[in-house]
Image (tube, rainbow, N blue to C red):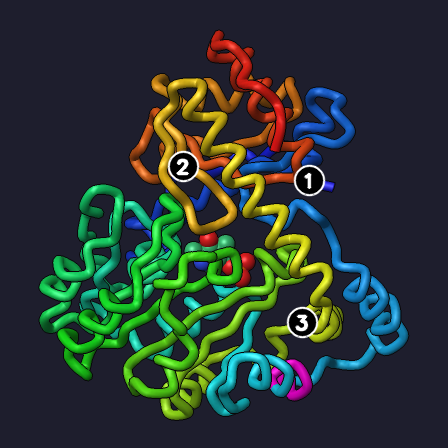
Amino acid sequence: MTVGREPTVDTLHPLARRALAGLEPYIPGRSAEEVTARYGIREPSKLGSNENPLGLSPRARGALIAALDRIHHYPDPDCSELKRLIAGRLGVTPANLCLANGVDNVLTCLGLAFLDPGDRCVVAAPTYTAYASRALLLGAMPVEVPLTAWRVDVDAMAAAADGAKALIVCNPNNPTGTIVGQPDIDRLLARVSQSTLVVLDEAYAEWVDDPAFPDGPTLARRHDNLVVLRTFSKIYGLAGLRVGYAVASPGLVACMERVREPFAVDRLAQAAAEAVLGDDDYLRSAFENNRAGRAFLGRAFAEMNLESLPSQANFVLVNLGRPAADVAEQLLPRGVIIRPGALWKLPTWARVTVGTAGDNIRLVSALADVLGRPRPAPGG
Ligand SMILES: *Cc1c(COP(=O)(O)O)cnc(C)c1O
């Protein structure tokens, strides 16, 4: 069990690649184990990492236990059965899929396959920080395009993409929870050159209820420069197992398969992912729990006079009106973990994951306590 963080070494070893000097270390959300060890709270509400608060799907649990009997065998390097199941669900073929050790690993594969040193890679700001750090690691140059009114500005991004090798849109965007609708994505794809790779990171797609949200996998079948990313870490509740994938043309997929590690998705991860794909009861409960919780948090923040953004994902970005890192620290002994916004240069904002109804009430009361505001009425 890891408790707290290892002390970090600030100076780089002289043998390190030059690209490492430009990288900020990734600061993950706090772990439940850390809060338990520090404050003796057995079940903290872990609302800092956008995981599924319902825990492991019962079907996935059964599949994991069954898979243990063959754990001494290497996994299927092609994830054939899992690819067949995903392809069936999305209406694509297995040749349209590249599976790896989480979307983070898919991003590494994309970089290794497509980014040369000096290539420009257009990203929004703020967005998921892994895009820029992966580009920098490979000697490529992230070009940041600010959001307009908290939304990804596809026209400004398309304009910045002239001569760029890649353009990445996180949809819904982390940390804002806002989406880019079908007409905007269509316009983006029409404007951007075929020699620019367009990546849509749809890690949160399964939580969306806005009908304007585009059908990424269908678009990926039609556009030879488009890659759509999906993960089992969010609605499928398998963040600890690490499975993510790309949907793209067979030509793009073949490039990623060349750089991917052969056994990137382990045996347990494949078994659990195969099982949870068919666990419709679990997925429906997760979706409904999130839709209700997201609305509850939006109302509660409004009652507390805190500005928050309308979200299509399983998190809400909220302005706490004072340094969010301090507030986050004060929430820990109250058993609540949130993600302060310094990571995205939004120091008074925090991103909170929608939890169970119990988690959400715990968050709102703890926050009212720390901020010295009246508690909003319970319910929802
Ligand atoms: C959580 C998240 C991912 C990470 O997915 P993994 O499959 O767990 O690596 C990818 N993209 C975004 C935008 C995320 O928020």
> Measuring 19% from the left and 55% from the top, which residue is drawn there?
153
Image coords of residue 237 (percent x, y): 66, 56
Kindly identify which residue carries mark 3.
Answer: 277
CB under 8 Å between callouts 2 and 1? no
Image coords of residue 50 (percent x, y): 54, 46
In this picture, which residue range is highlighted in magenta? 78-83
Instruction: Give the mark nearer the N terminus: 2 vs 3.
Output: 3
Secondary-structure class at tag 3: helix
Q: Is 80 covered by the magenta stretch?
A: yes
| Residue type at tag 1 | Thr
365 or 146, which is in the foreground?
365
Number of other residues with Cα within 10 Å of mark 1, as a class: few under 14, some 14 to 19, many 20 or more: few
Instruction: Give the mark nearer the N terminus: 3 vs 1.
Output: 1
* Most common secondary structure along the magenta stretch: helix
Report whether residue 3 is seen.
Answer: no
| Residue type at tag 3 | Leu
Left or right position of 293 against 159: right
> Measuring 62% from the left and 28% from the top, which residue is drawn there?
379
88 or 71, which is in the foreground?
88
Kindly identify which residue carries mark 2.
Answer: 317
> Measuring 36% from the left and 69% from the top, which residue is drawn there?
214
Q: Nearer the viewer, mark 2 or mark 1?
A: 2
132 or 249, which is in the foreground?
249
Left or right position of 336 against 107: right
Kindly identify which residue carries mark 1.
Answer: 2
Q: Is residue 9 above or below residue 170?
A: above
